[in-house]
Amino acid sequence: MPPATRYSILPSLLPTIERLTNEFNQIAPERKQILRELTDFVRQKINAGDVARLNFICTHNSRRSHISQLWAQAAAYYYGLQNVQCFSGGTEATAFNPRAVTAMQKAGFDIQTFKGGDNPVYHVTVAAGAPPLPVFSKRYDDIVNPKTDFAAIMTCSHADENCPLIPGASKRIALTYNDPKDFDGTPLEAAKYSERVDEIGREILFAFSQVK
Protein backbone atom coordinates (compact mmCIF):
# COMPACT_ATOMS: atom_id res chain seq x y z
CA MET A 1 0.00 0.00 0.00
CA PRO A 2 1.19 3.54 -0.71
CA PRO A 3 1.92 5.93 2.17
CA ALA A 4 -0.82 8.17 3.54
CA THR A 5 -1.63 11.09 1.29
CA ARG A 6 -3.22 14.47 1.80
CA TYR A 7 -5.72 13.61 -0.92
CA SER A 8 -7.54 10.31 -1.34
CA ILE A 9 -7.71 8.93 -4.87
CA LEU A 10 -11.26 8.73 -6.19
CA PRO A 11 -12.88 5.33 -5.54
CA SER A 12 -13.71 5.15 -9.25
CA LEU A 13 -10.02 5.48 -10.18
CA LEU A 14 -8.45 3.36 -7.45
CA PRO A 15 -9.19 -0.08 -9.00
CA THR A 16 -7.43 0.93 -12.23
CA ILE A 17 -4.42 2.21 -10.31
CA GLU A 18 -4.21 -0.93 -8.20
CA ARG A 19 -4.41 -3.12 -11.31
CA LEU A 20 -1.72 -1.15 -13.16
CA THR A 21 0.66 -1.11 -10.18
CA ASN A 22 0.53 -4.92 -10.26
CA GLU A 23 1.60 -4.90 -13.91
CA PHE A 24 4.99 -3.20 -13.63
CA ASN A 25 6.59 -6.45 -14.84
CA GLN A 26 5.03 -5.75 -18.25
CA ILE A 27 7.27 -2.71 -18.71
CA ALA A 28 10.32 -3.47 -20.85
CA PRO A 29 13.76 -2.78 -19.31
CA GLU A 30 14.57 -0.14 -21.94
CA ARG A 31 11.37 1.72 -21.07
CA LYS A 32 12.19 1.58 -17.36
CA GLN A 33 15.53 3.17 -18.15
CA ILE A 34 13.76 6.13 -19.77
CA LEU A 35 11.25 6.33 -16.93
CA ARG A 36 14.10 6.60 -14.42
CA GLU A 37 14.91 9.98 -15.97
CA LEU A 38 11.45 11.15 -14.91
CA THR A 39 11.89 9.56 -11.48
CA ASP A 40 15.24 11.28 -10.98
CA PHE A 41 13.92 14.69 -11.98
CA VAL A 42 10.98 14.50 -9.56
CA ARG A 43 13.14 13.11 -6.75
CA GLN A 44 15.81 15.78 -7.14
CA LYS A 45 13.25 18.58 -7.08
CA ILE A 46 11.42 17.22 -4.04
CA ASN A 47 14.64 16.55 -2.13
CA ALA A 48 15.76 20.12 -2.83
CA GLY A 49 12.47 21.51 -1.56
CA ASP A 50 11.52 22.71 -5.04
CA VAL A 51 8.42 22.18 -7.13
CA ALA A 52 8.68 19.47 -9.78
CA ARG A 53 6.98 20.96 -12.85
CA LEU A 54 6.25 18.49 -15.64
CA ASN A 55 5.06 19.59 -19.08
CA PHE A 56 3.92 16.69 -21.27
CA ILE A 57 4.15 17.63 -24.93
CA CYS A 58 2.82 16.17 -28.16
CA THR A 59 1.97 17.73 -31.52
CA HIS A 60 -1.72 18.55 -31.10
CA ASN A 61 -2.14 18.31 -27.31
CA SER A 62 -5.17 16.16 -27.94
CA ARG A 63 -4.48 12.64 -26.68
CA ARG A 64 -1.14 11.33 -25.35
CA SER A 65 0.02 14.53 -23.64
CA HIS A 66 -3.29 14.98 -21.80
CA ILE A 67 -3.41 11.32 -20.80
CA SER A 68 0.14 11.57 -19.44
CA GLN A 69 -0.51 14.83 -17.59
CA LEU A 70 -3.54 13.45 -15.79
CA TRP A 71 -1.85 10.16 -14.92
CA ALA A 72 1.16 12.01 -13.54
CA GLN A 73 -0.98 14.14 -11.25
CA ALA A 74 -2.88 11.05 -10.10
CA ALA A 75 0.40 9.21 -9.47
CA ALA A 76 1.75 12.10 -7.39
CA TYR A 77 -1.35 12.04 -5.20
CA TYR A 78 -1.35 8.25 -4.97
CA TYR A 79 2.24 8.10 -3.76
CA GLY A 80 1.91 11.09 -1.46
CA LEU A 81 4.36 13.28 -3.36
CA GLN A 82 3.87 16.95 -2.64
CA ASN A 83 4.95 19.85 -4.87
CA VAL A 84 4.39 18.08 -8.18
CA GLN A 85 2.61 20.16 -10.81
CA CYS A 86 1.63 18.64 -14.14
CA PHE A 87 0.90 20.42 -17.41
CA SER A 88 0.54 19.60 -21.09
CA GLY A 89 0.82 21.34 -24.43
CA GLY A 90 1.45 20.90 -28.12
CA THR A 91 3.14 22.53 -31.04
CA GLU A 92 -0.38 23.70 -31.90
CA ALA A 93 -3.75 23.78 -30.12
CA THR A 94 -6.65 21.58 -31.26
CA ALA A 95 -8.91 19.96 -28.63
CA PHE A 96 -8.76 17.24 -25.99
CA ASN A 97 -10.04 14.43 -28.22
CA PRO A 98 -13.43 13.10 -27.05
CA ARG A 99 -12.29 9.51 -27.59
CA ALA A 100 -9.43 10.09 -25.17
CA VAL A 101 -11.81 11.79 -22.74
CA THR A 102 -14.10 8.75 -22.83
CA ALA A 103 -11.22 6.34 -22.30
CA MET A 104 -9.99 8.32 -19.29
CA GLN A 105 -13.49 8.39 -17.83
CA LYS A 106 -13.69 4.63 -18.30
CA ALA A 107 -10.46 4.33 -16.30
CA GLY A 108 -12.09 6.23 -13.43
CA PHE A 109 -11.13 9.89 -13.92
CA ASP A 110 -13.93 12.36 -13.15
CA ILE A 111 -14.03 14.60 -16.24
CA GLN A 112 -16.68 17.29 -16.49
CA THR A 113 -17.19 19.83 -19.27
CA PHE A 114 -16.67 23.31 -17.84
CA LYS A 115 -16.89 25.23 -21.11
CA GLY A 116 -17.92 23.94 -24.54
CA GLY A 117 -16.84 24.96 -28.01
CA ASP A 118 -14.30 23.77 -30.55
CA ASN A 119 -11.67 23.51 -27.80
CA PRO A 120 -13.64 22.63 -24.66
CA VAL A 121 -12.33 23.26 -21.18
CA TYR A 122 -12.72 20.28 -18.85
CA HIS A 123 -12.40 20.07 -15.09
CA VAL A 124 -10.74 16.82 -14.12
CA THR A 125 -10.79 15.44 -10.58
CA VAL A 126 -8.49 12.59 -9.57
CA ALA A 127 -8.65 12.74 -5.77
CA ALA A 128 -11.18 13.75 -3.12
CA GLY A 129 -10.44 17.23 -1.77
CA ALA A 130 -7.99 18.05 -4.56
CA PRO A 131 -8.82 21.04 -6.76
CA PRO A 132 -10.04 20.06 -10.23
CA LEU A 133 -7.48 20.36 -13.00
CA PRO A 134 -8.53 22.67 -15.86
CA VAL A 135 -7.71 20.78 -19.04
CA PHE A 136 -7.87 22.06 -22.61
CA SER A 137 -5.69 21.98 -25.70
CA LYS A 138 -2.93 24.59 -25.85
CA ARG A 139 0.59 25.23 -27.07
CA TYR A 140 3.41 24.07 -24.83
CA ASP A 141 4.36 27.71 -24.19
CA ASP A 142 0.82 28.82 -23.30
CA ILE A 143 0.51 31.35 -20.49
CA VAL A 144 -0.80 28.69 -18.07
CA ASN A 145 2.28 26.48 -18.55
CA PRO A 146 5.65 26.92 -16.79
CA LYS A 147 8.24 29.08 -18.51
CA THR A 148 11.40 28.04 -16.66
CA ASP A 149 12.84 25.12 -14.69
CA PHE A 150 10.52 22.32 -15.83
CA ALA A 151 10.87 18.93 -17.45
CA ALA A 152 9.67 18.77 -21.05
CA ILE A 153 8.41 15.24 -21.57
CA MET A 154 7.90 14.49 -25.25
CA THR A 155 5.08 11.99 -25.63
CA CYS A 156 5.09 11.72 -29.43
CA SER A 157 7.96 11.20 -31.83
CA HIS A 158 6.78 13.96 -34.19
CA ALA A 159 6.99 16.62 -31.48
CA ASP A 160 10.27 15.17 -30.23
CA GLU A 161 11.83 15.34 -33.69
CA ASN A 162 10.42 18.74 -34.66
CA CYS A 163 11.01 20.59 -31.38
CA PRO A 164 14.73 20.14 -30.72
CA LEU A 165 14.61 22.98 -28.20
CA ILE A 166 11.90 23.71 -25.61
CA PRO A 167 12.70 27.17 -24.19
CA GLY A 168 12.98 27.23 -20.40
CA ALA A 169 13.12 23.46 -19.93
CA SER A 170 15.83 22.29 -17.54
CA LYS A 171 15.27 18.64 -18.54
CA ARG A 172 14.02 16.97 -21.70
CA ILE A 173 12.78 13.38 -21.73
CA ALA A 174 11.67 11.48 -24.86
CA LEU A 175 8.90 9.24 -23.52
CA THR A 176 7.00 8.59 -26.73
CA TYR A 177 3.87 6.51 -27.32
CA ASN A 178 2.02 5.25 -30.39
CA ASP A 179 -0.97 7.36 -31.34
CA PRO A 180 -4.40 5.76 -30.73
CA LYS A 181 -5.68 8.10 -33.46
CA ASP A 182 -4.49 5.44 -35.93
CA PHE A 183 -7.53 3.38 -34.95
CA ASP A 184 -10.17 6.12 -35.12
CA GLY A 185 -13.28 4.90 -36.91
CA THR A 186 -12.28 1.23 -36.73
CA PRO A 187 -13.75 -1.63 -34.67
CA LEU A 188 -10.62 -1.49 -32.50
CA GLU A 189 -11.01 2.20 -31.61
CA ALA A 190 -12.29 1.90 -28.02
CA ALA A 191 -9.97 -0.99 -27.17
CA LYS A 192 -6.88 0.80 -28.50
CA TYR A 193 -7.66 4.01 -26.60
CA SER A 194 -8.09 2.02 -23.38
CA GLU A 195 -4.87 0.14 -24.14
CA ARG A 196 -2.96 3.41 -24.51
CA VAL A 197 -4.49 4.83 -21.32
CA ASP A 198 -3.35 1.70 -19.48
CA GLU A 199 0.14 1.74 -21.00
CA ILE A 200 0.75 5.38 -20.11
CA GLY A 201 -0.74 4.96 -16.65
CA ARG A 202 1.32 1.86 -15.92
CA GLU A 203 4.57 3.58 -16.90
CA ILE A 204 3.88 6.87 -15.14
CA LEU A 205 2.86 5.06 -11.96
CA PHE A 206 6.08 3.04 -12.12
CA ALA A 207 8.17 6.19 -12.47
CA PHE A 208 6.50 7.81 -9.46
CA SER A 209 6.65 4.62 -7.39
CA GLN A 210 10.45 4.82 -7.53
CA VAL A 211 10.71 8.40 -6.19
CA LYS A 212 10.65 7.36 -2.54
Image (cartoon, rainbow, N blue to C red):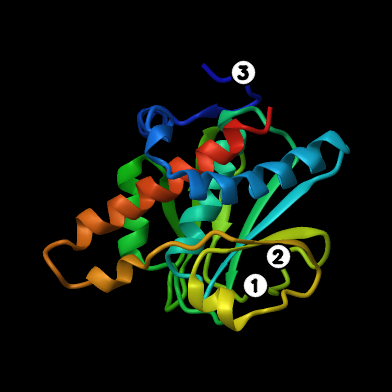
The residue that mark 3 highlights is 3
Image point 56% across, 30% down: which residue? 78
Whether residue 70 can be seen here: yes
Of the 4 image quadrants, the one containing the C terminus is: top right
Left or right: 17, with 36 as reference point: left
Q: Is residue 143 above or below residue 196?
A: below
Say what amino acid the circle numbered 3 marks: Pro
N-term mark: 3 or 1: 3
The residue that mark 2 highlights is 145
Image point 66% across, 42% down: which residue? 39
In the figure, residue 51 lies in which quadrant?
top right
Query: CA separation, marks 3 and 2?
Result: 29 Å
- Which label number is shown at residue 140? 1
Q: Nearer the viewer, residue 147 or 128?
A: 147
Dot 3: within a 10 Å radius of its alpha carbon, few (fewer than 14), some, or many (20 or more) residues?
Answer: few
Whether residue 60 can be seen here: no
SS type, badge 1: loop
> Residue 111, image x and y in percent?
42, 50
N-term mark: 1 or 2: 1
Q: Is residue 134 above or below residue 13?
A: below
Dot 1: within a 10 Å radius of its alpha carbon, few (fewer than 14), some, or many (20 or more) residues?
Answer: many
Marks 1/2 in contact by CB < 8 Å: the verdict is yes
Query: CA separation, marks 1 and 2?
Result: 7 Å
